């Protein structure tokens, strides 16, 4: 599916299904609306799926893996070789999020959308062997940015056809908090130092270097704040572009997408700037520890379910939400109604 087609397919949520889901919640024998965001989540899922009979039996995590040329500038603690090692580890239940996926029954799908090397088992959807160094030139061409977005859309299409009902977003790529901070700085019109954090453990000197590199790249390349694809092409990464496509593809195909932390949120805001209607198809899992996380959530008009001070990435926060959604659905599907429990129905108090 091409980008233009995906954008064209995005429709508002099904209000009738949402109303039916609220009606069912209000018939359950408990204080009205007492499960708060859990009830809201089920109603949102009903609106996305077009039915009050919500089912999340098949869950997927899509991890976009890519390298970033800007690591040449000394903005990271780890070397670029770590990207490929961790990407392969996803398939051996050796990484944090793969352990979480095993426990939650989530299918894990790492995608090589732009790693600097090839690996034996990670699915190949490579746009290039890493981006260019944005400190010296645009990270990618505009066509590469579109191609990477369409990789994300295509992956959602495949999973939908395979029967998956919900997708979570994850990423792996040394240097991607630098690209995400640059993207966020442009999207929100904020100075780089306001939106840039330490990533995977930079020293204060390293953080200063990271901020300076981002500021210089934005000044040199002048990404257009009104053009999300121009921002991606000049200061983004293939992983961010792929995740942008996941959000757009989910909305086009009526599949809910659980947003992870800072990097996923930057991709989500790009997607919303491309197609505002996709916002309603996104669930915000957690508030990342990165400094811009709260700003991105506010820009997306989202409230996170979890506040755990996580900043690991990989989709770990998104997968952590799945058990919460499962519990909400168990209550929604299995708890007695007021009539079944022979309790007088609660009514809203004025």
Image (cartoon, grey):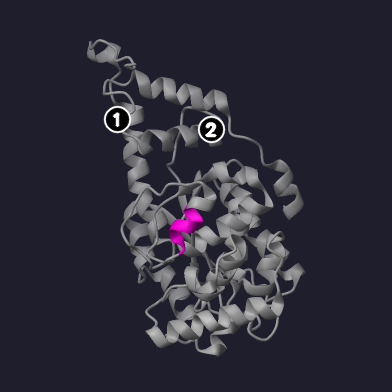
Q: Name the residue: 53% across, 32% down.
A: 47
Looking at marks 2 and 1 on the same chain, the residue that comes earlier in the sequence is marked by: 1
Q: Is residue 307 left or right of residue 300?
A: left
Residue 11: give x, y in percent of width and height: 66, 37
Q: Which mark is residue 34?
A: 1
Which is more foreground, mark 2 or mark 1?
Answer: 1
- Callout 1: SS: loop
- Mainly helix, strand or loop, the magenta region? helix
Above or below, 233 against 31 in this view is below
Residue 222: give x, y in percent of width and height: 71, 73
Quarter of the picture holding the C terminus: top left
Q: Name the residue: 58% across, 46% down.
A: 160
Above or below, 21 against 321 in this view is above
Residue 255 visible to the viewer: no
Residue 119 visible to the viewer: yes
Q: Name the residue: 62% across, 51% down.
A: 272
> Badge 1: few (under 14), some or many (20 or more) residues near its Cα, within 10 Å?
few
Q: CA distance from mark 2 to mark 1?
A: 20 Å
Residue 320: give x, y in percent of width and height: 35, 54
**Based on the displayed image, in which of its 4 quarters is residue 40 positioned?**
top left
Tell which residue pokes out farthest to the left in this image: 342
Stretch of the chain drawn in magenta:
292-297
**Based on the displayed image, in which of its 4 quarters is residue 130 positioned?**
bottom right
Residue 132: give x, y in percent of width and height: 66, 82
- Callout 2: SS: helix
**Based on the displayed image, in which of its 4 quarters is residue 38 positioned?**
top left
68 or 64: which is nearer to us? 68
Q: Which mark is residue 86?
A: none
Q: Name the residue: 56% across, 26% down.
A: 15
Q: Which residue is mark 2?
A: 47
- CB-based contact (under 8 Å), mark 2 and mark 1: no
């Amino acid at each position: 599916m091409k980008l233009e087609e995906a954008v064209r397919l995005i429709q508002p949520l099904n209000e009738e299904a949402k109303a039916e889901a609220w009606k069912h919640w209000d018939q359950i024998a408990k204080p009205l609306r007492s499960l708060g965001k859990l009830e809201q989540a089920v109603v949102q899922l009903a609106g996305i799926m077009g039915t009050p009979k919500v089912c999340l039996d098949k869950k997927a995590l899509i991890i976009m893996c890519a390298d970033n040329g800007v690591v040449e500038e000394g903005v990271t603690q780890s070397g670029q070789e770590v990207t490929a090692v961790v990407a392969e580890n996803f398939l051996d239940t050796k990484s944090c999020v793969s352990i979480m996926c095993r426990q939650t029954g989530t299918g894990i799908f790492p995608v090589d959308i732009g790693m600097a090397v090839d690996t034996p088992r990670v699915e190949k959807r490579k746009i290039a062997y890493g981006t260019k160094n944005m400190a010296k030139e645009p990270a990618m061409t505009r066509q590469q940015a579109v191609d990477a977005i369409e990789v994300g859309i295509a992956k959602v299409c495949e999973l939908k056809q395979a029967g998956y009902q919900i997708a979570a977003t994850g990423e792996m790529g040394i240097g991607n908090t630098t690209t995400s901070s640059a993207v966020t700085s442009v999207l929100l019109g904020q100075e780089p130092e306001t939106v840039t954090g330490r990533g995977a453990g930079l020293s204060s000197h390293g953080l200063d270097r990271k901020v300076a590199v981002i500021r210089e790249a934005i000044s040199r390349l002048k990404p257009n704040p009104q053009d999300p694809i121009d921002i991606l092409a000049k200061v983004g990464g293939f992983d961010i572009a792929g995740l942008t496509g996941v959000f757009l593809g989910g909305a086009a195909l009526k599949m809910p997408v659980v947003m992870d932390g800072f990097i996923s949120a930057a991709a989500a805001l790009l997607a919303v700037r491309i197609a505002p209607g996709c916002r309603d198809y996104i669930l915000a899992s957690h508030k990342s520890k990165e400094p811009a996380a709260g700003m991105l959530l506010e820009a997306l008009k989202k409230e996170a379910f979890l506040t755990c001070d996580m900043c690991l990435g990989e989709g770990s926060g998104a997968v952590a939400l799945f058990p919460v959604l499962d519990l909400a659905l168990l209550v929604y599907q299995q708890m007695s109604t007021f009539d079944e429990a022979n309790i007088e129905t609660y009514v809203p108090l004025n």
